[in-house]
Image (tube, rainbow, N blue to C red):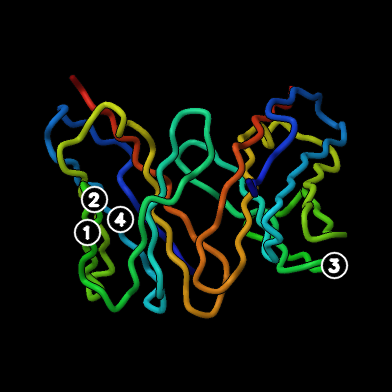
Amino acid sequence: GEDVEQSLFLSVREGDSSVINCTYTDSSSTYLYWYKQEPGAGLQLLTYIFSNMDMKQDQRLTVLLNKKDKHLSLRIADTQTGDSAIYFCAERDNYGQNFVFGPGTRLSVLP
Amino acid sequence: DAEITQSPRHKITETGRQVTLACHQTWNHNNMFWYRQDLGHGLRLIHYSYGVQDTNKGEVSDGYSVSRSNTEDLPLTLESAASSQTSVYFCASSPGGRETQYFGPGTRLLVL
């Protein structure tokens, strides 16, 4: 079955770059997503990438996709304390309308 | 503005009781989903619906049921609450196609 894996915790210093990694198993995944969850809130879409892309950049966020290794990463440049949250990777195939989420990576930004 | 809401935001109940969590969206989205979030497991799909009168079981559907009598609402019912159902529950909706899912604020449920 489909499975999405992430490391559970990441700590970085304010101003450094953060890299959150994700691996997935479904080779038919067409869309891959990154969501952010702040304390006490629901998930908010940060960005997504289509499977025929290698990279997508949006301001401080860079998404890299290695389709051969089924590896997705999210890089946050100049990490701020407001970036502290849980980040979820999710995949969806082109045929289904359901998402499979990873366990989430809790990012802690230290002053 | 269109939105997705959940109620209640917090609920404490006892084992064996029936509990219903409400989810309401005003986007007119066809697709609606219920997830539970537990530490170390991320989000796990409980039930989902692709339209009125359509309901489907997800990964962890045992002990839960849903009904879809209109486009806007997908209530989640715990038939006989168990302590293992203590969790944070998220409802989501999407219009389908390439669109993402939009999440509600969550309901924190404690079963004693």
Q: Does mark 4 fall on the same chain as mark 1?
A: yes
Q: Does mark 4 fall on the same chain as mark 3?
A: no
* For discs 2 and 3, the disc positioned in front in the rendered view: 2
Q: Nearer the viewer, residue A110 or B14?
A: A110
Q: Nearer the viewer, residue A44 or B77?
A: A44
Q: Mark 3: which secondary structure?
A: loop
The answer to whether the residues at label 3 and label 4 have Cβ atoms under 8 Å apart is no
Residue pictured at 68% horizontal, 41% vertical: B5
Q: Does mark 3 fall on the same chain as mark 2?
A: no
Horizontal side of residue B22 vs B10, given as left or right: right
Furthest residue to the front?
B1
Q: Chain of mark 2?
A: A
Q: Which residue is mark 2?
A: A61
First of labels 1, 4 by sequence position: 4
Q: Which mark is residue B69?
A: none
Q: Mark 4: which secondary structure?
A: strand
Horizontal side of residue A14 vs A85, given as left or right: left
- Label 1, label 2: how far apart the Cα atoms are: 6 Å
> How would you rate the neighbour count of disc 3 (Cα within 10 Å): few for under 14, some for 14-19, many for 20 or more?
few
The answer to whether the residues at label 1 and label 4 have Cβ atoms under 8 Å apart is no
Residue A8 locus on image (x, y percent)? 34, 40
Q: Nearer the viewer, residue B70 or B107?
A: B70
Q: Which residue is mark 4?
A: A22
Q: Which residue is mark 3?
A: B53
Furthest residue to the left?
A16
Residue type of the residue flagged with mark 3: Gln
Residue type of the residue flagged with mark 2: Leu
Residue type of the residue flagged with mark 1: Gln
Q: Chain of mark 1?
A: A
Q: Quadrant of residue A57?
A: bottom left
Q: Which mark is residue A57?
A: 1
- Label 1, label 4: how far apart the Cα atoms are: 17 Å
